[in-house]
Amino acid sequence: MSKVPPSRALPPITKRFTALDWLYKNLFSPWYNILLTLLASLILYAILKPTILWILNKARWEVIGANLRLLAVGQYPADQAWRIWLCLYLLVGMIGLTWGVWARMRRLTLAAWLTFFPLIALIVHGSPLAKPLLPLVPSHLWGGLLLTLLLTVVGMVFSFPIGVVLALGRQSKLPVIRLFSVVYIELVRGVPLITMLFMAQLMLPLFLPAGVTIDRVLRTMVGITLFSAAYMAENVRGGLQAVPKGQYEAANALGLGGFQTMMNIILPQALRAVIPVLVGQFIGLFKDTSLVAVVGLLDLLGIANSVLAQPAFIGLQREVYLFICATYWLFSYSMSYASQRLEIALGVGQR
Amino acid sequence: MPRYRHSPIIRLVRVKSLFLFFALLAWACGGKNNGTPSAVQNTGKTLKQVKARGKLVCGVNSQLPGFGYVDPTGKYAGFDIDYCRALTAAIFADPEEVEFRPLNAQQRFTALQSGEVDVLIRNTTWTLSRDTDLGANFVAPTFYDGQGMMVRKNGGISSLEGLAGGTICVQAGTTTELNLADQMSARGIKYTPVVLETADAVFGAYEQGRCDAVTTDKASLFSRRVVLAKPADHKILDVTMSKEPLGPMVRHGDDQWLDIVQWTVFATFAAEEYGITSANLDQVKGSTTDPNIKKLLGLEGEMGLKLGLGDDWAYNIIKFVGNYGEIYDRNLGPKTPFNIPRSLNNLYTKGGLLYAMPIR
Amino acid sequence: MATRFWRNERFLQVLGQAAFLLLVLYLVYALYNNMVRALQLQGLVTGFSFLQQTAGFDIGERLISYSRSSSYLRAFQVGLLNTILVSALGILFATALGMVVGAARLSTNYLVKSLAKVYIEIVRNIPLLVLLVFWYTDFFLKLPTIKEAWIFPGPIYFTNRGIAIPWGIATASFRTYLWILMLGLLITLGMTWLLILKGRRTGRPPLVTLWSLVTFLGVAVLGWILFPQPPLTVDIPYIDGLNIAAGLTLSPEFMALVSGLVIYTAAFIGEIVRAGVQSVSKGQLEAARSLGLNAFQSLRLVVFPQALRVIVPPLTSQYLNLTKNSSLAIAVGYPELFSVSGTIFNQTGRAVEVITLIMATYLSISLVTSLFMNWYNYKVRLAEG
């Protein structure tokens, strides 16, 4: 191997890459980039300057201040608001617990989560039996961000088992089961969510036996769950397809029956592979709950419309809508950021 | 290749229990089907349900000042709300045992049909199609209204013809939408409708200048004008485009409930006819010799019992809510910002249409 | 000895499916029964004959003739055509804007790249309904009144009653001109086919898209000149009293819906395009350049076809989402399928029939769109062996 003679060797690079160089390279290097940079700066200036000036000077933010409670929890009685705070603390506690002890105490954590959801439902809704401590708060008083989060969580939690069953059904060998799963999934995925909501609102009462009435919020939850289950099924199916055939064969060779293979071998791998996609679906569902405003429920968007109807605050669309846009954006962005971190932590795609 | 992990019995039991679960579900959904139900079977059901529940569930409007809205303290108030309270007082002797469900124009009928609300008192117009198509019955109108049109004063429009080529904002799913189409086509006026979902959206769009005019029941126009930014800039045309008799609505099939709501309304008319107010009620009750008043206030005749209520049903209505005149004045009268003249909404003896059927 | 029947795999499978089928059928029967009973109890009927009744309401924007004396079925058709119009325009413009945004995302210019990233991140994280309502009430409804309209060169008027643009009016010769355009289309198709064959034969594919466009435009212009009276006359809008006369006025509802859908979907399409282009390994681009292809050719012949394979499936689902999202027109007051059906339901009280109609229609539209996109996907797929 010949060495490069010293006389032919190039001197080491002594020039440092300064900020000016960065500017040149990224903004001005080919000639058309200069034009693009100018154009983009102009657009940026034209948009940002009036916006910032408006936000600081002309916007009347008192509409948000006066209605913060409405926007947050709707018409939930003020003296019962401590229950919402309790739920929030419990949630934070559960997340901390999971983060800490998931690796070591799986069963305990799972059991905790399983009791967590009914507990939250009890605390928020109340019960006639727990009169002095937890009086009943009927569901038509729930609203604002509380209702949005409730609908999202309930939708996600209940659509999960249904979605898994549908996904398994879709790839089953039994033709009848496969047919039903496919028909359900394609039917629900082909119609807009708002159609499902209307169907739940208007037709569900007709389908129930005589004398059984069902709460409006509960109807919406059913509609959202059924809708979300179809998308969940498709996502889980993707995960199932990612599990190598060898796993099925190995399980077979070990003598495991169909149900056991699924529960112990296939599903854990499949679900782990689709966790990022599921978080994405959670975020999508969170945004889609804004549609319940059209069927008359007072979620964050519905309450915003109500606030705008108050005589004192007529015409302040920009402030109110910007605020709820910001709220939705904050939640969605944090969740998708957390999902990206989760993806890295799980090592998806690297194993 | 056979795969037997557990004994067949256990596998069978496992599978069987799954099927059992679904079978139970199906059976539960089946419910009790005793052939074709008839109306007679349902009479009395609603009152029983209301009494068992301990409160009345009333479907109302929450966006119509004067008729049904939420005041700054969070309480429901309005003309229709007072009728809900009257009905509650008649049943429970307490006007507060009522739960108000705000419904928009799309949900109102389904909410009534599905049983979510017991009665719908939400400025609903009585028409033939609604009486037949919607599975509901109307009760005597409490407010005789007509459809009107509101325009800007500086728009230079003084009649419907002036709206030729213009845009008119209207709410979806109302008789207003149909009447507008009928009236404009009958007069041969071409216009463009802008149809929005909620009353707030409609009036918001009108205020922003999206349309030249907005149309709905005249009483609603009066009440919504008050909450516009500059009420003095708008005027209500002197045109009545249709009959809009507004009143409570109940489901088909329960005759007893229909009677109860019907006669609650008539009781308020009758009270005004006899000059009984919430102020002089006890005094009238103690000193009257008129057999009609006696029957109304439960001193003789057991009218309440026939309805399935207590004998003080009408007494409670007048005591807690008042007669028709008091209800009207409290919500729409000269002391309110609306100040709607009574015109047709007056007793038959004073040139109006209110006529209580005999309570005897 | 043969296996007992209760241990026989196949028998159990068939038995299981039969039992499942029976259960589902019973469930459906029970639900249907409940529904019919509930409707009977209230004196309501079922059946689709109500569609022939007179509608009685007016629809503000329509592509076909309609009046208040038309039937409900006609009203439904008007709504359907409006949906198709909005979806088609939405897909077209969203794809165009999405490509621009995707290209911006891949640009070497830091400012442009960041602007695109910020746009995508903001739009993707807010709900479409909030965006639509905000956009409609805060921009389109707050445009100036007709007397103080913003006038752009064209003339194009921006008012809160709508955006008026110059449009064409068909003259007597317009029909014949359409035939000429049809002929031009056939010629262009033939020419495209010939060009593709030539490309295959010589191994140097010509710029097929460019030549086809040139041919078609040539035929169009030639046909235009041939006529003594031009097939279309320009209709210039002007302000007339309460409204804008002449030209084409796009209502604020329509503009809000289409532009809102475009802005929302373009963000997703931009990400898809970026992911697609980045999925093509850098080695392909380097190899193409080292073979002597210039930048444009390597993009056109090497990178883009491979990127298309990755782009098309998610693009399909975005198109379907756009079509389904057009149902949100109910929030801005545009009379498309869903809101017209809502009105029909309100006037007739037929919940079950109307919802069935809506679902069937949306399913058909989704099916047609995904069939077309699946065919396209098949065409651009990786031809293995």
Image (tube, rainbow, N blue to C red):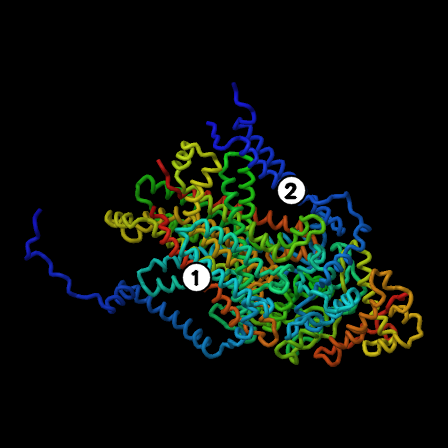
Picture coordinates of residue B324 (x, y %)?
80, 73
Residue bearing mark 2: B26
Say which chain tag 1 marks: A
Q: Are marks 2 and 1 in contact (CB under 8 Å)?
A: no
Q: Residue furthest top?
A: C1
Q: Is residue C73 above or below residue A315?
A: above
- Secondary-structure class at tag 2: helix
| Labelled disc at residue A333 | 1
Picture coordinates of residue C311 (x, y %)?
40, 49
Say which chain tag 2 marks: B
In which quadrant will I find the C terminus of chain B?
A: bottom right
10 Å crowding of disc 1: few (<14), some (14-19), many (20+): some
In the foreground, A181 or C108: A181
Q: Is residue C107 visible?
A: yes
Q: Amino acid at mark 1?
A: Tyr
Picture coordinates of residue A81 (x, y %)?
56, 68
